[in-house]
Amino acid sequence: MTPRIVALGGGHGLYATLSAARRLTPHVTAIVTVADDGGSSGRLRNELDVVPPGDLRMALAALASDSPQGRLWATIIQHRFGGNGALAGHPIGNLILAGLNELLGDPVAALDELGRILGIHGRVLPMCPMGLSIEADVSGLEADPRMSRVIRGQVAIATTVGKVRRVRLLPNDPPATPQAVDAIMNADLVVLGPGSWFTSVIPHVLVPELAAALRSTPARRALVLNLVAEPGETAEFSAERHIHVLSQHAPDFTVHEIIVDASRVPSETERAQLRRTAGILNARVEFADVSRPGTPLHDPARLADALQGVWLRCPPPESAAQQATVPTPIANGPRGDDPWR
C-alpha cells in the first residue's frame, strides 16, 4: 500500500514538498495558507472577496497529472498576462479559480473542479474557507531596540527590515476547512514545511481546529526545515531558532522527525545542539542530503527519500499493515520538478 500524505504550507516551499510527495504516492493532499495579500492574489481578494488563489494555484500545478492534458493545463494556469492593462500580472489560474468560486459558491468545490481538469489524484484545500490576515510584532524598527511595532499583512511582514518576534492571525480563531481536518486525521504522514516560516508554516498551527487535528492525528508527523534563512522574515535564523519560534507559537505541537539538510549543520557539535533543541518538539533529527546541488532548492527525489524514511521507520498502529510493503516511487515527477517556474 502507498501512504496517504498531507502537506501543509504555502508558496514555493509547499511546491517542493508536493513535488517530493507525489513521487511516493498519488494520495497527496495539500493544505494551503490563505493570507497572501500581494500581487494578483491581493488584487483578487480585495476586488472579489475570494480566498487568495496564488498559493492554491501553485499547489494544483505541483500535483497536475503527467498526461498531455495535465501538462498543458499546468502550463496554462501558471501563465501570467503581460502588458500594462488591468490583467497584467494575473496568472490565468488565479482568474479561473476566482471565476469558479463565484459560480460554485465554494472555494473547495472550485479547487476540486480545476483539479479534475488537471488530472489530480489527490486534493488541494485551503486551510481556512476564507482569506485571513497576518499581524506581527517586529522589533528593530524603533530607536529603542526593546520596542516592537505591529506590522500587518503577509507581504509587509515578509519584507520587513526588522526582526519578527511573533505573528497572529486575524481573526484570531478562524475556522478550519472541514475537509482539511478530515485529511489530517486520515493521513499516514503529515508534513509541515519548508516555506516562509512566519507566513506560510506557523499559520497552520494558529488555526485552532487544525492545531487540534495535528495534535491528535495517528499519522507520522514530519517537519522540514528550510535550507537557508530568508531575508526579512528569518534573516540570520539558525536551525534551532526555527524550532524555538514554532514551539513558542504552538507549545503543544510535536512531531516525530525533523528533516534537516546535512550541509546546513555540518559539524557534530552543531548537530548535537540541534538534537537537544528538537526535544522541545519531542522529535528526532534526520540529517539528509535533500538540497539540489548548487541551488537553495530542495531536490524532489532526495526529499522524497527522506519522507519515505519517516513513514517507514515507525508507522503508527493504524498503519501497521502497511509496514510490510515499501511504497514504490512513482516514476515521473511533476514537469521539471521546479518550484520556481
Image (spheres, rainbow, N blue to C red):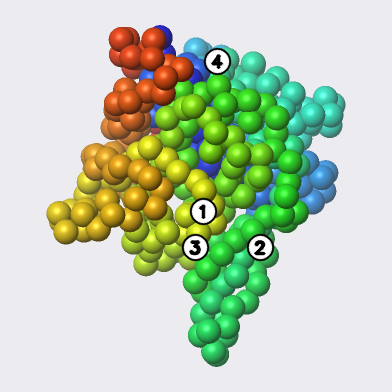
**Amino acid on which disc 4 is placed:** His
Dot 3 lies on which element? loop
The amino acid type found where label 3 is placed reads Glu
Residue 140 visible in the picture: yes
Kind of residue at disc 2: Glu
State whether residue 38 is above or below residue 287: below
Judging depth in this view, the residue of 50 and 206 nearest the camera is: 206
Query: Considering only vertical position in the picture, is 125 above or below 171?
Result: above
Q: CA distance from mark 3 to mark 1?
A: 21 Å
Of tags 1 and 2, the one toward the viewer is 1
Instruction: Please give the residue where the numbered disc 3 appears in the rendered image.
Output: 233
Q: Amino acid at mark 1?
A: Pro
Mark 2, residue position: 135
Q: Is residue 255 left or right of residue 87?
A: left
Name the image quarter holding residue 237: bottom left
Mark found first going from the N terminus, 3 or 1? 3
Pointer 1 with pointer 2, Cβ within 8 A:
no
Q: Position of residue 313 (x, y in %)?
A: 29, 26
Query: How far is mark 4 from mark 1, CA to CA?
Result: 34 Å
